Amino acid sequence: MAVAKVLCVDDALFMRTKAARLLAGQGYEIYEAVNGADAVDKYFDVKPDVVLMDITMPVMGGIEAVKAIREKDPEAKVIMVTAISQRSMVLEAIRAGARDFVIKPFEPDKLLEAVRKQCQG
């Protein structure tokens, strides 16, 4: 079975690093993007199986990035990673096409479970 590719998108280096280390340790191939615009570009270069997308970022936010990706790839699997205070934005992200969300600071098991679920389904 091919190794699943995950694109980790967050403007905070420590959050990208934390998610990347966790997922790489489980055998996932990791790519990183620093904002939504970077994520859209990398998505079409890398064609990841799953995208972990922060909501609030400079240049282009996560919701705009989900819309841009799903416009060209309706099958894109995006998991939003968000602070609990952004609950209304999570609903907007789901309407924009995100398939799941994880609250940060994330619990490693919850993040792994969300990624596994998207890779299987």
Image (tube, grey):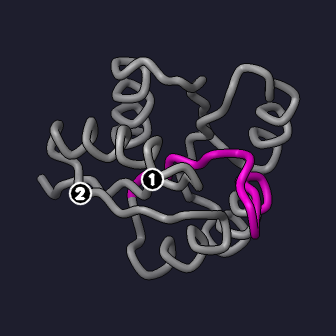
> Who's the residue at 27% across and 35% down the image?
22
Check if residue 63 falls in the magenta segment: yes
Q: What residue span does the magenta drawing correspond to? A: 49-64
Using the rendered view, name the quadrant where residue 87 is placed: top right
Mark 1, other Cα within 10 Å: few <14 / some 14–19 / many ≥20: many
Percent of width and height locating residue 95: 82, 42
Is residue 24 rendered to the left or right of residue 51? left
Is residue 60 rendered to the left or right of residue 29? right
In the rendered image of this protein, does residue 38 appear above or below residue 58? below
Q: Say the numbered circle drawn on residue 8.
A: 1
> Who's the residue at 50% across and 71% down the image?
43
> Who's the residue at 23% across and 57% down the image?
29
**Dot 2: what SS?**
strand
Percent of width and height locating residue 40: 60, 72
Using the rendered view, name the quadrant where residue 61 is placed: bottom right
Task: Count the labels in the image.
Answer: 2
> Who's the residue at 16% across and 39% down the image?
25
Q: Which residue is mark 2?
A: 29
Is residue 4 rendered to the left or right of residue 121? left
